[in-house]
Amino acid sequence: MSTDTTSGTDTTSGTDTTSGTDTTPGTGTTAVTVPPPAPGGPALDVAALRAATPGMRHAHHMNAAGSALPSAATLAAVTDHLRLESLLGGYEAAEALADRTEAVYHSAARLIGAAPQDIALMDSASTAWQRALGALRLKAGDRVLASPSTYVSSALHLLEMRDSHGIVLEVLPADAGGQVDLGALETALREPAALVTVAHVPTSSGLVEPVAAVGELAARAGVPLLLDATQSLGQLPVDVEEMRCGIVVATGRKFLRGPRGTGLLYVDRELRERARPAAPDVRGAQWSSAYRYEVVPGARRYETWESSHALRLGLGTALDEALGLGVARIRDHVTELAERLRAGLSDVPGIRRTDPSAAASGIVTFLREDEDPRRTVRDLRATGFRLTTVPASHGQWDLGRRGLERVARASLHVYNSEDDVDALVAALTARERRRRGGGTATPGPAISGAAADAPVSAVEPAPASATPSEPPYDPAAVSRPAPARPTGPVGDRADVIVIGAGIHGSSAAWQLAARGASVIHLDRFPAGHTEGSSHGRTRMIRRAYPAEVWDGLVDTAYSAWDELELAAGQRLVTTTGGLYARAVDAPGTLRGPGCENVDHTRAAELFPGLRLCEGFTAVHDPAAGVIDAQASLTALAALGRGHGVDRRDGRTVLAWQRDGEGVRVHTDQGALHADRLVVCAGPWTGELLPAFAGPLSVVRIVNVHLGSSRRHLLEPPLLGAFSVDVPDVGLLYGIPAFGGAGVKIGLDHGPPEDPSTTAGPVTEAERDRLLGLASRFLPAADGPVEETITCRYTMAPNNRFAVGRLPGEERVFVAAACSGHGFKFGPALGAALADLAEGKERPDLDFLSPAAMGITDGPGPGATR
């Protein structure tokens, strides 16, 4: 269970809310002119946008239509104002930043081609809809013409007004492409109507409604158009003049990338003259005498006094970012990705696209045959993809009309790339292959472990095991022939015997079997034991290493985890970022691709849950994360069984010897024979390979999981993987609260321990030492000790590994002495051992060869020739 150790803002202000005319200093009543978007132009810098979006460290986020990921700048705008409120008070903080709040109206107006006085800030699109519709004072007999793309909350409001106010609700038909039927609308407008409403993009598909044509027909008939731009604003151009809109409602949390709890309302001047709020508020009206009040002239008459100024400032930042990128460029990017995804889905057996032919937005919907979309999305989330489903109850006039009970929905944004799209197609393809009984077609790109999904509430993990009729997909088998079904060992003979069922032995056994070898897999303890180095809940993975010689192997490790996740059909790696701290004057440090040095102030911004004092510096590794160790071992065991591995737990190996062209392994239950032997025995390596007994040492390691009354401070993203080299104490390492367990901490060295004895429980002194360090560096870890764990590190000189062929033995291979940081390399070293056992050279591992550790020819006295 060893844990790895080693934008500019427009500040124009001043809308007059008390005079009798709409005036904004510097603008009057003239709408802000937005030039028409030019197609093409420079492509977005997706890498920079991803780097500025903290959430992209955790998953392939494809749910912008639900709630897009905000940028770090948007997050900072919100949190900075909340801090100011804590210092000054809410009213005083609002006064201090009144100009910045005022600028939000100007940014919103620029985005839709309106004037600032036409804009009201709301807490949601639904609130905006209700306030605007209430102001129209619809009465019995008034006709409302609604598109079939209407969102559920809007439809429910209209149905209630039909029942309570007697309005006449008419749902327009759709044409063959799925858009509102313009001919039917033109016919319906020959009779008096009070309102036309259309959703620019529905929640249930990638459809784009012909809003300008709808607006032209409505304007010609003298009927106001209410546009629901909830799913379009931020990804598609919206121009209220061109579209002839009287009312526009939108939310901040979707394609605008603003905070949840924000929204926009636009009402044009002419409509405001006859549309008074049904429930005026002190924000939008002035109580002028005992029985008289006047509403303010602009759209702010629809606002209410109480609102979150912090969220509004976050919305302003998001609006400015969208304006800076240019909506036309955003549109080009997301629609191109969506078309790539639709094309990719068309090639996946068993997948049915459900977007209508008029789909032209960043939303893509689909179904898997004979499967509830909730299961599809659940399994995708477990492998690092954030998608969602849309039920017919959210779009009865669309999905219900088309006979679709529910669809899976992916929605793309500026921080998504072609790699995200291809990874999703590859994941669906691989899952379909497993579902249909395997296959060897070349898969798409592997899922990126660096974007693996953070824990998803109410989502069960995908099953780790597979039945013989549904073997798991194995990327390693793509380029080499494999038997039609696992053959397995015959009696007590196999192609390969693997000793040790920790991470390295389990990875090697799976890889060998997946390549067609028969494998007997031995471990001296029952499954799930806690005597070695691979048990426990979690491990750390990182790119930060002390020397460049490790970089290639680290890259291989990340790729190997991607392959294992794809084969297992579940997420095993969660990216959290990492901080690795030491005293400013301490020698040595970590470094690595994508890593940067930060001071203690920046470290506190990155991980507020970790407290470093002024005398510390740190290396920030954004690719670092957490491995689900328990799930990984379970998945490897299941994958091995699926390929015919004969796992024999509770079988102690006494000795081994050469046996003609193979090896004979003597166990406490008889002898076994194989062509090759792979030894991954952890602390017991010295017993089986006595040449290692001298260089290796076994030490006791203690971990504790701690609870907290402020658990969010110990979870990602407020805390990630970390270590602190504490002067005169040692290296404190930790893994954030994860998977229901509290934050995990330990020290990376301990006293020598004899692996032939049972590891004793954590002592009170060991626990108290860690609690003292937690109080110093993790102030939020104030809860009880939830769990204590002991394990064993097998240490090698210079904290290196020994991986390769045993000197003097052509048929014996070893992975040993991983010095407390080997779990992250498990799948990579398993594949390397399989390569070596097949006779392939691995020069990239020469720096870790047993010979480099000083191991010489010959097995020694613990084994027989």
Image (cartoon, grey):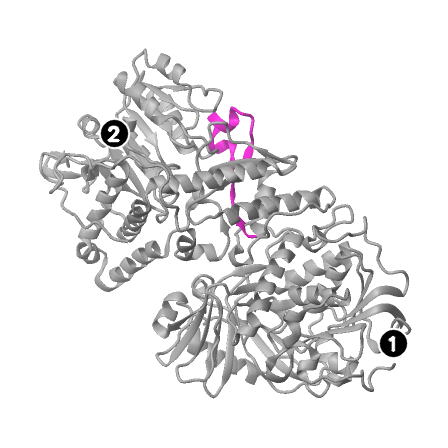
The C terminus - image quarter: bottom right
* Residue span colored magenta: 384-408
Vertical order, 314 against 410 (above or below): below
Q: Earlier in the sequence, mark 1 or mark 2?
A: 2
Q: Is residue 754 above or below residue 734?
A: below
Percent position (x, y) of residue 662? Answer: 87, 71
Along the viewing direction, whichever of 95 and 728 lies nearer the viewer: 728
Q: CA distance from mark 1 to mark 2?
A: 86 Å
Identity of the residue drawn at 65% across and 61% down: 632
Residue displayed at 29% across by 59% down: 82
Q: Is residue 282 visible?
A: yes
Mark 1 neighbour density, 10 Å: few (under 14) some (14–19) many (20 or more): some
Which sits in the foreground, 760 or 699?
A: 699
Reading the image, the residue beneath label 1 is 658
Amino acid type, label 1: Arg
The magenta stretch spans residue 831 = no
Q: Which residue is mark 2?
A: 241
Q: Quadrant of the N terminus?
A: bottom right
- Rendered view: 725 above or below 469: below
